[in-house]
């Protein structure tokens, strides 16, 4: 049994959280623009040279990215001065140098699932804001059409019936532990 597994991989899962879910009201262009920057920043986890100096990498990546964006996109996405953005992003992405992040962002679960010779039942919550239920259940079916999948209606990443459905903090406020 697999519960809310990120079969599509860590990078796509992080993209889902940081771009698709965090910027739902922005234009498709602005989400893609931020997604391009975000994906470049995820390189910190997979490149030890970059990880040595996250702030310099962030600064260079940010200014190169910024030069390519139209004013409307910058206005929609940038809140604060360049120095604040660089400092905030450097801080936010500095954890990516840790070994766990390298593993999470580079591990390919599909290889392990392809080698399984036992039945698999994969469940994802319809309201999951951390692991895209549709993308992951579709990926599981592509790996092996005999695997059983089910999207549990109305539940979040922890299989709780959520009220806000988008707040990780809500996990702790809900009385239900698992549906």
Image: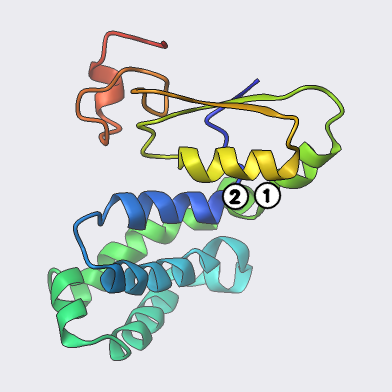
Label 2 Cα neighbours within 10 Å, binned few <14 / some 14-19 / many ≥20: some
Taking the view exactly as shown, the residue that stands out farthest to the front is 145
Q: Position of residue 9 (x, y in %)?
A: 59, 50
Residue lying at 20% horizontally and 23% vertically, measured from the top left:
163
Left or right relative to 52: residue 169: left
Q: Are marks 1 and 2 in contact (CB under 8 Å)?
A: yes
Q: How is the protein colored in the picture? A: rainbow
Q: Is residue 98 visible?
A: no
Of the two numbered discs 1 and 2 on the same chain, state the one appearing first in sequence: 2
x, y (%) of residue 22? 27, 52
Helix, strand or loop for disc 1: loop
Residue displayed at 60% across by 73% down? 49
- Residue 48 figure quarter: bottom right
Q: Is 77 placed left or right of 146 in the picture?
A: left
Left-right relation of 151 to 112: left
**Which of the 4 image quarters holds residue 65?**
bottom left
**How far from the left and from the top, in percent, is residue 44?**
52, 66
Q: Look at the image and tell me in which quarter the C terminus lies.
A: top left
The residue drawn where x is 35% and y is 17% is: 160
Q: Position of residue 43 (x, y in %)?
A: 54, 68
Residue 60 placement: quadrant: bottom left
Residue 107 image label: 1
- Residue topped by disc 2: 9
The outermost residue toward the bottom is 67
In percent of the image, x 77 and y 22: which residue is there? 119
**Eyeballing the image, is 60 above or below 23?**
below
Does residue 56 sit above or below 124 in this rendering?
below
Q: Is residue 161 above or below residue 88?
A: above
């Amino acid at each position: 049994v697999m519960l809310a597994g990120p079969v599509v991989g860590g990078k796509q899962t992080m993209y889902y959280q940081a771009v698709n879910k965090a910027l739902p009201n922005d234009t498709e262009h602005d989400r893609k623009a931020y997604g391009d920057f975000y994906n470049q920043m995820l390189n910190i986890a997979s490149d030890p040279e970059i990880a040595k100096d996250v702030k310099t990498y962030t600064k260079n990546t940010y200014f190169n990215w910024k030069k390519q964006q139209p004013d409307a996109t910058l206005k929609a996405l940038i809140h604060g001065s360049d120095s604040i953005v660089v400092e905030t992003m450097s801080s936010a992405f500095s954890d990516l140098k840790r070994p766990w992040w390298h593993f999470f962002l580079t591990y390919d679960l599909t290889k392990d699932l392809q080698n399984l010779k036992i039945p698999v039942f994969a469940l994802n919550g319809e309201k999951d804001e951390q692991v895209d239920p549709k993308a992951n259940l579709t990926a599981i079916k592509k790996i092996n059409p005999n695997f059983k999948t089910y999207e549990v209606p109305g539940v979040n990443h922890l299989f709780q019936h959520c009220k806000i459905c988008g707040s990780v903090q809500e996990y702790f406020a809900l009385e239900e532990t698992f549906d």
